[in-house]
Each structure stands twice: as C-alpha cells, then as structure tokens.
Image (cartoon, helix red, strand yellow):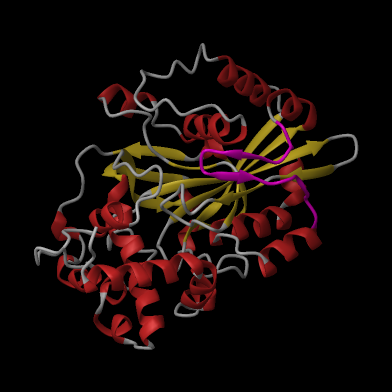
Amino acid sequence: MTLTASQSDWLRVRSFLREHRHALAVDAAGDYPATRRVAGTPLLAAPEWQLAEPVPLHDIELEFIPRPPSAESGPALGEVMAPLLPERPDGSRYRCYSDALRDLAAPAVFENRPTYRLTEADLGKRRLAFTRGRYFDGVDTGEAAAHEYAAARLGAGDEPRRAGLRARIADPCDLGRRPVILAITTLTLRFEAATGRASFLMHWRDPAKVGHAGGMYQVIPVGIFQPSGEASWYEREDFSLWRCMLREFDEELRGTPEEYGAGPVDYGSWPFARHMAAALDRGQIRVWCLGLGVDPLTYATDLLTVAVIDSRVFDELFSQEPRGNAEGSVLAAREFAAHVIDDIVTSEPVQAAGAAVLRLAWRHREILAG
C-alpha cells in the first residue's frame, strides 16, 4: 500500500501518541484546574462525580432513555475534525477518525459495537442515565482529541488549544459536549480476612491488540458498559453494571473467550454468575463505587469500582499467576499497600482511571474491608 504524505504524517503522530500516552496524559491534566483532579492523579471529575466515601454498587440507579439526544444539543465538531483526518491517494479525506484508524493502524479487535452512552451522572444522587451509542462514537472524538494534542506537541504549536477539537469540547466533564462511552474500571482485591491483608492484579494492555491505552498498565477487569450483542434483547438484559462486570471478570481473569452475539446470556443459570451472586449475597464479595472520572488526554470516561473478594472465593474462581490474555498480559499479584500504590502511580505508565481507583481504594481501605 502506497501512502500519501498526509497518511504518513498521520501515522507519525499516531506512533508518537502510542509511545507517549502516559506522559501526554499527565501534561494534558495540567490544562485543567487542580480541583478537578481525582486523588492527585491526572483523572478529572466534576464535583457531582466525586464521592466522600464508597457507595455500594447496587445503590447506583440506572435509567435508560432509548432516543439519543439531538445533534443540536452539543457543539458541532465536524468542522474541527478535518485537520485530524488524512487524505487518501484519490484525494478524498477520511470521514472520521475510526475510519483512518481501521485502515492505517487497526488493533486486533476493532468493532463498532453498540454501547450504553452516558448522558447524565450525579453520584451524589446515586444516578446514571444512558441512551444508545456506538463504540466508535468515543473513538471519533476521544482518540481524535488525543491525536490533536500529540500533533501539537510534535509541532510545538498551540493552535488546538485556541481553535481545535479540544477547544470546541472545552470541558471533558460536560456530558453534553461529546458522545460519552462509559467503561467500568474495577480494582479487584483478594482479601484475607484472617490477616486483613489484600493483594491485587494489574493488566498490561498490548498496543497490537487494543485500540485504547495500548502500552499502558491498568487494574483488572475493565470493560465498556455495553450489551453482549446487537439484538434488542441484549440491550434489555445486559443493562446492569454488575452483569457487565461479570462478563469482564470471566473474560479477563478467567481467560474465557468472548462470544459476542452468540445468544442471550442466562445469568440465572450460568455457573460462574451464580457462584459470584451467591458469594455476593453471603458478603464474601463486596462491590463498591468510588466515583467517576475522565482521562484528560483521550476523554475516556470510567466508573471507578472496587470488588473485594474473600481469598477462599477468589482462589476457587481465579488465579494470581501472571499470564497472557486477549488484550495483553495479566501481571503477578501485588500487595495492596501504600508504598506499592505510590510506586505504581508515580513511576509506571498506568492509566489515569487505574491510578485514581488505587489511590481512592487505599484512602477508603477500612470501609472497603467491611
């Protein structure tokens, strides 16, 4: 494939973004008030997204509004997208960022699946509202905004800050300024009740396999809040934070291949889901929400959660051994301790949401331990 000069330049910026995501995110956080930063990390949050203490996940009420908001409800972004999209050999320009990414630098899994698009969030009122969305909605704004920031860094210019996509979106915490595709970031703690000690796993995201945050570390599991197939029954049955987390636990920690669209998931008869539900009912699993935040570089938006699992239940279901999976590598277990968390947050390229949930979990460790 012969590339145009425009495509080659796009790939140069994309490569720079992939290699320097963490440093760029840290720098991008500096463009926003320190009061917006969660627990001293780059993650940004509106006041109503922050919690004084953890809230049980089942206390969060979800509302689904099928009709998406009108295009007029947010800023027109098309006119500021064009400079971020390369030209093809026939002189035409890519229609959107996901088209360019799919054609020039697609990861192993890159599909425009349906999602639940976040439209309202007030954790003080324990409420999240959603409508229908698609995965590429987030790519076309968030990855494009990150590309714009990386291009400015390479060119040492400030035009994007004054007139580009990031300037048009302005406040990444304003859910009306862009399509917001929510991910659920879960810190999993293996808790030993007899000693009060806990450990956790980290995940390295392989840039060849994932479209977002490749080359970075993250807690595990993490997944987009989305139905498990296209049909309407998936949309109804999967509209649950807990059920989404169950599927991610099964895929990322148990290594079960994802069977997207293979049929409705019968959570009542699925042995793994039943085992987890029974442990939850017995208090051997405790699941908490710690807040909501947005990455300052990519605008990736994450619900911050913690699953505290008693060691006996954890060992029946999961492993602490390092291993590969469909999105990268699960690393060896680490002690849940202040010095370990400090080392990860300050010296490793960990995603902003992962850094924030680790900091918050340590801050609230006594509540989480129950």
Residue 80 point in image, percent of width and height: 20, 72
Residue 173 point in image, percent of width and height: 39, 64
Residue 283 highlighted magenta (yes or no): no
Residue 101 point in image, percent of width and height: 30, 56
- The residue depicted at 46 percent of the width and 75 percent of the height is 28
Asked if residue 354 lies left or right of residue 81, the reply is right
Which residues lie in the magenta part?
319-337
- The residue depicted at 62 percent of the width and 60 percent of the height is 355
Residue 325 point in image, percent of width and height: 57, 38
Please state which of residues 244 and 59 is positioned toward the viewer in this rendering: 244
Where 212 sits versus 273, above or below?
below
Please state which of residues 359 and 22 is positioned toward the viewer in this rendering: 22
View extreme (right): residue: 195
View extreme (front): residue: 2
State which quarter of the image contains the N terminus.
bottom left
Where 230 sits versus 60, above or below?
above
Residue 5: quarter of image? bottom left
Please state which of residues 281 and 214 is positioned toward the viewer in this rendering: 214
Please state which of residues 349 and 237 is positioned toward the viewer in this rendering: 349
- The residue depicted at 46 percent of the width and 29 percent of the height is 258
State which quarter of the image contains the C terminus.
top right
Residue 156: quarter of image? bottom left
Residue 17: quarter of image? bottom left
The number of discs equals 0
Residue 320 highlighted magenta (yes or no): yes
